[in-house]
Each structure stands twice: as structure tokens, then as C-alpha cells.
């Protein structure tokens, strides 16, 4: 049994001559809170795609709990406990929040082939759906169609879907993207309240969120790993400032020091 | 040895002529699907209409053969303009299911109309005098008709090539197929382009149906009968790749002819089975680029 | 203009509403009121079952296939062959025929259901054409152009004998329609049914939830094939004869037209569509059989062009509009 819950070795992905991901190594221990940062177009979302199995690498390997999952389909990896959320809301927009979560919980409780019992009477699934809804504070909009929800609530449903699957490893792809700062608090609380046993990889541009949630960080630039280490050291690094954070970081640094 | 060569030449002649007819019919759909993104299952209907017009003009009005071909093409092009404005304009951007259902509806209308006008049986084609008979080219005799089809097919290919590669219309068409929104931004009137392309495609289908009437017999079910073959040519060539569709059509013609020659009882199935397997293997076309 | 497919209401508590008994009351009344038209009624029941099978697969799972006639034909020929080899019990014949059809779906599903959209349509069309042609060539099995005539079946439940006036046939087919409808309703409102709708709406997300999408699609495909097989077997039993037209590709296309006409993804839509279609066909054939295709084509074009959700969708909109007007009055 490997000591790392999630590991990427030498991941490479190129489209023709364009190398989008170049020799990326990543190692997350159980319970990690790891941020993946980098300028736009650095290949962060591609990396998440490679890790979750939606994109096939040109070379390299992905390990989940020590097992080589490089050849495994996304559904297989999810069943093994690797769950991702989407940067652009990717839910079942014509269905209500309850129905969305029903799908996730139902799959986890293996009701995928249950053709006899009416879905509305499956109390074990529904109970857990309501539990997740309450935990995420979504009780008010539970009966609404996802397409009718405010953007911030949609992001919460995204995360609720992921949590409903009881992940071992959670890949959060820009969870705060597009959320007005006033509504951010709920999201941050949820992420901070995550079970310490879950291994979390979070892609984010919002440095305040990253600072609060992450303990280590990997900096990705042009598909390559620039730097890796404890969050404080990475944020303070001159190189990273130069490449990515720029003047804005210097300002937030002085604020964050309080 | 002579037998094999003779058989090979037979397959070559018959296969290439059949393939060229398929190409002429299918090229219109290649353009329509590649350019207008419309799944037009009624494309075969244009071929059928063209065939029926040409043959009935020859039988009833005694028009000379080449004139009937022209008349058929012109009339179908006009018909296609009308249909485009009436029906197809509603299908841009519609879901695939909608397009399929509506064009299937058009198919049924055409099949019904043909049955009412011409009866349910195969419409007999009598080739004009100068196309009858065969010519001795050494190893075996070849039907003049088949050679005519090949020459006409090659002429169409050359004209299309000239149109696409050497005219500004062709350049605009290729640009619009490649990227419609950018083409619009740089000032290409895409709607008019569509209409013209649709007309050309339908006219070519009519030509194929008319010229190929002695090879692909005219009957009311013509639009459905050859639908799959035409669709597969379009699909395997990658939905809009004109050069590839020529290659695919000829290969289809060769394999079908060879199949029927080598395995008389079940030869007709060979091509269908092969095409089914190929589509399963490469749903995006045989020549799809290594896309992400 | 996209056809509205009814979104999931599966989580609403499943209750058989009394309104659902109305169609069956009508069907029973039909038996007494129009005894001369019982053969037509039987044909409507058979067609409705076939349309239902297609609705399951297209309307709920989103698998657009033009080749469903294959399963109808397999059901029909299986029933016919069973009868000719001496097995006359009707109910078990239907079950066996359905099983054969489902078996072939289980075989072809894993291969075909990797495709979507246009490639799937082409391949299903191709397979149906090939099977139809092959049946013609395999005349030692299928009777070729002449078909398999003279099929005789034992009385249903050893009590109700088949009669010329078609009374037994009608009630028998109606009973099967009832059974199939219950099965379909159960499946559609189960967790499996919700998962199918999830697949139809966002397949990628279902995979990322860990759902075994291909297996689930194969399961509904097999179920739907079985139902189509039931329709085919009933066709054989009520006609006493099976010919190549049972495998004709047209049927699948017409069934698609039926469910589109009345509204996809609403099981009762399949029944309404079948009734409308068969009645129009019956009347059209009185004038001239060839006007038939023309009429269907025009109907299809008009429905796709103008209506959202077919006949039932229009009725829905109508009742919603009436309700609104009543509410503003009060």
C-alpha cells in the first residue's frame, strides 16, 4: 500500500506539437489539502481531466491509493473514490436539486439497476439526500430545478454532488469561480468543514480561499510544474510572484500577514 | 491468369462507375452536412426525383438523353430552392432528432408522390442508342454506358475541383465549412452561400440519380433504399471532407462489386456489414484527425 | 422548436391515478360498441405495445434507433416457429419470443450502444436492413416471400378459444397492453428509470458519478427489445401468419412517427400515437393506399415544424392555459 492516496507520475499530454501537460509529478498523502495554482492556460483543468480519467495521457501514470488507474474509465475511478467537481456547472439542469442528488446517492448505494421500487419510495436514498441537502444548507431550494438556481447555489449543488459520493479523493476545479464575494463565506465554510480524512486537490485563483484551505501547493506554468511545497513558502517565493502573482500578491501579502 | 485479370478489370470498371455515381449523389450531402450541419435524410429523394424526371421526359416527350439530364438537374435545383426556404431553413440549429424526423417526413412525401404518379413498380429505363452496346477493349468487352458514366463522373470531379479550388465561391464555401462564425464575421454572406450550396448539392444528386438510373433502378423506395449507403459515404469521409468522400465512394463501389462477384448469394451483404463495422470502429469518420 | 421531452417526475410519489383507467374503460367499451372493428382494435393494441417499446428507449434513455423493427420481427418469427414446431400455448409463446428478442439485444447492445447520434442511427438502420434482407434469403427458416402461414394456437388459459370474430384476440392483446404498461411505468419511475434520464440529460456527469452507463443502457435496450418482441408475437398470434413485412424497416420509422406525433417520453403518448396513426391509416387506405405515405410525411413535417411535444404536449399547454384563465377569473 502506497503512502500516497493520489499520485501522478510523469503525466504528459500533447495535441500534435502542442504540449499541454509536460512531465507533471504530483503526490498527495491522505488528508492532504493541496492547491494547484498557476496562470490561465497553464493546463490545470487538463490535469484534472487526466487525473479523473476523462482525458487519456500521452504518457505517464495515475495512481489511486497505490493502484495504477491510468487505463481505467472515469466511472471506475469514481467508484474507487476519486470525485471531481466542475468549473462550469455541469449538473442535470432540467432536474431538481433533490433529483440531482438522488442520482449521486443512488449510484453510491448501488440502486443503478433497481427497476422495481419506485424511486420516490426509496427511503434509504432519500434520507441521505436530505441529509446532504441540510449539511450544505440547500433546504430552501431543494425542489427547484438547477437551471433556476442562483449561480452560487449551483456551485453548492456541485459540491453537494461530490460529497454525496463519499469521496476518498476530491478534485475541486475552481469552486469559487464566478461567486460574488458576499456569498463566498458559505463555500469556504463547507470546504473547511470537509472530513480531514478526505484528500483534497483544489484549483483556485482566489488566493484568499487558497490560503485558508490549503496546506501545500503546486504551481503549474505552461503545463509544467514550476514549484511545489508548503503554502507559505510557495506564496512567498520570488519566482512564483514573478511568473504569476505579480503586484497584486504583494498587496495581499501585507494584508494576509495580519 | 487471364480470367483473374478479366475479373479484376470487370470489378474495376463496374466498381468505379458505381462508386462515381454514389459520389455524385453523396457529394451534395457531404457539403450540406459539413456546411449547414443539417442531417438531411431526404437527400436521396432529390436523386430519385432527378431520375424520374429524366426518364419520364425521355419516355414521354422523346427528349434527347443529354437534354433530359440537364432538365432534371435544373428542375431539381429549383425545387431545392423552394424546399430550402420552406422547410430546411427551420432546421438550422435544431436538434438532430428534429432534423431526422422532418427530413424523414419529406422522404415519405416524396415516396408517396412517386407511387401515386408512377406506380409502385420499378420504372423501366431505356438507354439511348449511343449508349447501348459494348466496346471491345482487349481483355473483355465493356458496356459503353459504364464508360460514359466514368467519363461523366470524372468530369464532375474535375469541375468540382475547379469550383472549390479555383473560384472565389469555392474559397468562401471552404471557409464557411471550416468555421461558419468567422466566415460571417469577415463578411461572407453565409445564408446565400448555403442556398447556393444546397442547390448545387441537390442538382448533383439529381444528376447522379438520372445518370445512374440504369444502375440504381428507379422505384418509389429509392430514397430510403440508398439512404444508408449515401449516409455511410458521408460519415466515413468525416462529414464534410470532399476529397475523402470521393475515395470512400469509389472504395464502396469496388467492394460492393467485388462482393457480389465473389459471393453471388450473399455478396450484397458484404458492403453493409463492412460499413456497419467501420462505423462502429470509427464513428467520426475514417480520416478523423487525431483530435483531443 | 426542439421537441419537448418530459423531464423527470420520477421522484413524485408513484400513485396510479384514476385518470389512467379512462383509456382502458374506453378500450373495453370499444369491445361492446364496435364489435365489427375488433381486428383493427387488436392491431392498434399490438402497434401501441411496439410504440411503447420504442418510447422506452428513445424517450427515456435517449437512444435514437431506426432499427427497432428487428426485435418486432424476431418476436413474430419466434412465435411462428414455436407454433409450427408444435408448441401451442399462447402466453408462454409470447414470453419466449420476448426472451429471444431480448437476447439479441443483449448481444448487440454492448457494441452498438457505444455510439450516439448519427452513427447510431446509421448503424441501427443498417442492421435492420441487413436482417430484413437476410430473412428474405433464409427462406428455409422464414418462408421467404411466402412467410409462415397457418399458425394455430391453443385457447388462452385453456379457456378462451381463438375465434373468427376476433373477440378473444382483442381482449388478449388488450390484456398484454395493460401488463406492458404496468411494467413500463414501474421501470420508468424506479431508481433505474431516474438513472436513464440522467444518462439522457448529461451522460458525462453520470459517468463521473460512477454510473455503469453502458450496462444500464444495454439493460433498457434489452427490456425494450423484449417488449417489441411481445408485440411481434402478438402480431403472429392475432394474424395466424408472419411474413417479411414483420421485419420491414418502415415499421420502426412509423413507430417513431407515432411517438413524435403524440409526445416523446410520455408512455401514454405511445398509445395515443398508435391509435391516431392506425385510425388514419385505416381511413386513408379506403381511398387509396398510396396516399397513406404522403399523409404520414405531411403529418411528420407539420408536427416537427409547429408543435412542442406532440399532441399530448399541446393538450398539456391547452389545459395549463385554461387553468391560468380560470385562476385569473376568480
Image (spheres, grey):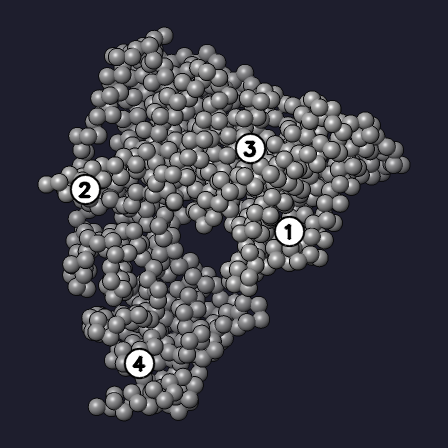
Question: Chain for mark 3?
Answer: B
The residue wearing badge 2 is C324
Q: State the separation of the CA atoms marked 4 and 1.
A: 51 Å
Apparent side of residue B81 relative to residue C317 in the rendered image (left or right): right
Residue C34 position, x and y percent, is: 29, 12
What residue sits 74% from the left and 49% below the top? B158
Q: Is mark 2 on a helix, strand or loop?
A: helix
> Is disc 2 in contact with disc 4, using a CB cutoff of under 8 Å?
no
The residue wearing badge 1 is B242
The residue wearing badge 3 is B224
Q: State the separation of the CA atoms marked 2 and 1.
A: 54 Å
Mark 1 crowd level (few <14, some 14–19, many ≥20, 10 Å Cα): many
Quadrant for residue A218, please give it.
bottom left
Question: Chain for mark 1?
Answer: B
What residue sits 41% from the left and 12% below the top? C152
Residue A121 position, x and y percent, is: 18, 44
Residue B186 position, x and y percent, is: 55, 64
The correct choice, above or below, for A71 with respect to B94 in the image is below
Q: State the separation of the CA atoms marked 4 and 3.
A: 61 Å
Q: State the separation of the CA atoms marked 1 and 3.
A: 23 Å
| Quarter the N terminus of chain B occupies | top right
Quadrant for residue A68, please give it.
bottom left
The disc label shown at residue A207, or none: 4
Residue A38 position, x and y percent, is: 40, 79
The correct choice, above or below, for B142 with respect to A76 in the image is above
Amino acid at each position: 500500500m502506497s503512502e500516497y492516496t493520489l499520485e501522478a507520475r510523469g503525466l504528459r499530454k500533447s495535441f500534435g506539437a502542442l504540449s499541454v501537460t509536460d512531465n507533471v509529478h504530483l503526490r498527495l498523502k491522505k488528508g492532504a489539502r493541496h492547491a494547484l495554482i498557476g496562470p490561465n492556460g497553464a493546463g490545470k483543468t487538463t490535469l484534472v481531466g487526466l487525473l479523473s480519467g476523462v482525458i487519456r495521457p500521452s504518457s505517464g501514470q495515475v495512481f489511486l491509493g497505490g493502484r495504477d488507474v491510468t487505463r481505467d474509465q472515469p466511472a471506475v475511478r469514481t467508484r474507487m473514490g476519486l470525485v471531481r467537481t466542475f468549473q462550469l456547472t455541469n449538473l442535470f439542469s432540467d432536474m431538481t436539486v433533490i433529483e440531482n442528488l438522488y442520482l449521486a446517492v443512488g449510484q453510491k448505494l448501488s440502486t443503478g439497476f433497481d427497476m422495481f421500487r419506485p424511486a420516490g419510495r426509496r427511503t434509504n436514498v432519500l434520507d441521505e439526500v436530505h441529509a446532504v441537502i441540510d449539511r450544505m444548507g440547500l433546504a430552501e431550494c431543494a425542489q427547484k430545478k438547477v437551471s433556476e438556481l442562483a449561480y452560487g447555489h449551483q456551485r453548492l449543488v456541485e459540491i453537494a454532488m461530490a460529497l454525496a459520493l463519499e469521496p476518498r479523493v476530491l478534485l475541486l476545479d475552481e469552486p469559487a469561480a464566478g461567486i460574488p464575494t458576499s456569498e463566498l463565506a458559505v463555500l469556504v465554510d463547507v470546504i473547511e468543514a470537509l472530513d480531514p480524512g478526505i484528500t483534497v486537490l483544489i484549483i483556485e485563483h482566489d488566493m484568499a480561499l487558497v490560503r485558508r484551505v490549503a496546506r501545500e501547493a503546486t504551481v503549474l506554468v505552461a503545463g509544467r510544474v514550476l514549484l511545489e511545497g508548503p503554502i507559505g513558502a510557495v506564496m512567498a517565493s520570488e519566482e512564483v510572484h514573478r511568473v504569476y502573482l505579480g503586484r497584486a500578491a504583494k498587496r495581499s501579502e501585507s494584508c494576509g500577514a495580519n | 491468369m487471364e480470367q483473374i485479370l478479366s475479373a479484376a478489370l470487370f470489378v474495376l470498371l463496374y466498381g468505379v462507375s458505381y462508386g462515381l455515381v454514389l459520389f455524385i449523389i453523396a457529394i451534395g450531402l457531404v457539403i450540406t452536412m459539413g456546411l449547414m450541419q443539417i442531417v438531411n435524410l431526404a437527400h436521396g429523394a432529390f436523386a430519385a426525383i432527378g431520375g424520374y424526371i429524366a426518364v419520364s421526359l425521355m419516355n414521354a416527350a422523346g427528349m434527347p438523353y443529354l437534354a433530359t439530364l440537364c432538365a432534371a438537374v435544373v428542375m431539381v435545383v429549383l425545387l431545392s430552392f423552394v424546399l430550402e426556404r420552406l422547410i430546411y431553413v427551420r432546421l438550422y440549429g435544431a436538434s438532430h432528432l428534429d432534423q431526422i424526423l422532418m427530413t424523414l417526413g419529406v422522404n415519405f412525401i416524396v415516396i408517396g408522390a412517386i407511387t401515386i404518379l408512377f406506380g409502385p413498380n420499378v420504372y423501366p429505363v431505356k438507354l439511348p442508342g449511343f449508349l447501348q452496346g459494348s466496346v471491345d477493349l482487349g481483355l473483355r468487352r465493356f458496356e459503353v454506358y459504364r464508360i460514359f458514366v466514368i467519363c461523366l463522373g470524372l468530369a464532375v470531379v474535375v469541375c468540382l475541383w475547379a469550383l472549390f479550388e479555383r473560384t472565389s465561391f469555392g474559397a468562401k464555401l471552404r471557409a464557411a465549412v471550416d468555421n461558419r462564425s468567422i466566415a460571417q464575421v469577415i463578411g461572407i454572406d453565409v445564408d446565400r452561400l448555403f442556398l447556393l450550396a444546397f442547390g448545387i448539392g441537390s442538382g448533383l444528386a439529381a444528376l447522379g440519380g438520372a445518370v445512374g438510373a440504369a444502375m440504381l433502378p428507379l422505384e418509389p423506395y429509392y430514397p430510403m433504399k440508398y439512404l444508408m449507403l449515401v449516409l455511410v459515404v458521408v460519415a466515413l469521409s468525416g462529414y464534410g471532407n470532399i476529397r475523402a468522400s470521393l475515395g470512400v465512394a469509389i472504395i464502396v463501389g469496388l467492394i460492393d462489386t467485388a462482393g457480389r462477384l465473389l459471393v453471388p448469394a450473399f455478396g450484397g451483404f458484404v458492403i453493409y456489414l463492412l460499413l456497419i463495422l467501420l462505423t462502429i470502429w470509427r464513428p467520426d469518420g475514417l480520416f478523423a484527425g487525431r483530435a483531443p | 422548436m426542439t421537441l419537448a421531452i418530459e423531464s423527470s417526475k420520477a421522484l413524485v410519489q408513484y400513485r396510479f391515478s384514476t385518470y389512467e383507467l379512462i383509456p382502458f374503460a374506453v378500450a373495453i367499451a370499444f369491445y361492446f360498441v364496435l364489435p365489427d372493428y375488433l381486428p383493427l382494435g387488436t392491431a392498434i393494441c399490438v402497434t401501441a405495445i411496439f410504440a411503447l417499446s420504442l418510447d422506452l428507449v428513445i424517450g427515456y434513455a435517449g437512444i435514437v434507433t431506426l432499427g427497432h423493427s428487428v426485435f418486432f420481427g424476431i418476436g413474430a418469427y419466434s412465435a411462428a416457429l414455436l407454433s409450427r414446431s408444435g408448441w401451442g400455448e399462447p402466453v408462454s409463446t409470447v414470453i419466449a419470443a420476448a426472451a429471444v428478442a431480448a437476447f439479441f439485444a443483449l448481444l448487440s447492445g454492448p457494441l452498438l450502444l457505444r455510439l450516439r447520434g448519427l452513427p447510431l442511427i446509421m448503424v441501427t438502420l443498417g442492421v435492420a436492413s441487413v436482417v430484413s434482407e437476410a430473412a428474405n434469403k433464409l427462406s428455409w427458416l422464414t418462408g421467404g416471400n411466402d412467410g409462415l402461414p397457418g399458425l394455430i394456437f391453443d385457447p388462452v388459459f385453456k379457456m378462451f378459444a381463438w375465434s373468427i370474430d376476433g373477440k378473444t384476440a382483442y381482449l388478449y392483446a388488450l390484456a398484454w397492453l395493460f401488463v406492458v404498461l404496468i411494467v413500463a411505468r414501474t421501470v420508468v419511475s424506479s431508481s433505474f428509470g431516474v438513472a436513464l434520464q440522467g444518462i439522457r440529460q448529461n451522460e458525462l456527469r453520470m459517468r463521473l458519478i460512477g454510473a455503469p452507463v453502458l450496462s444500464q443502457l444495454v439493460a433498457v435496450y434489452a427490456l425494450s427489445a423484449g417488449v417489441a418482441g411481445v408485440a411481434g408475437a402478438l402480431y403472429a398470434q392475432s394474424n395466424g401468419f408472419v411474413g417479411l413485412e414483420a421485419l420491414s424497416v418502415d415499421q420502426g420509422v412509423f413507430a417513431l412517427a407515432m411517438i413524435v406525433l403524440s409526445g416523446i417520453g410520455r408512455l401514454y403518448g405511445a398509445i395515443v400515437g398508435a391509435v391516431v396513426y392506425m385510425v388514419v391509416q385505416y381511413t386513408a387506405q379506403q381511398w387509396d393506399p398510396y396516399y397513406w405515405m404522403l399523409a404520414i410525411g405531411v403529418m411528420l413535417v407539420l408536427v416537427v415544424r409547429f408543435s412542442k411535444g406532440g399532441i399530448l404536449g399541446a393538450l398539456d399547454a391547452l389545459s395549463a392555459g385554461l387553468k391560468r384563465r380560470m385562476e385569473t377569473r376568480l
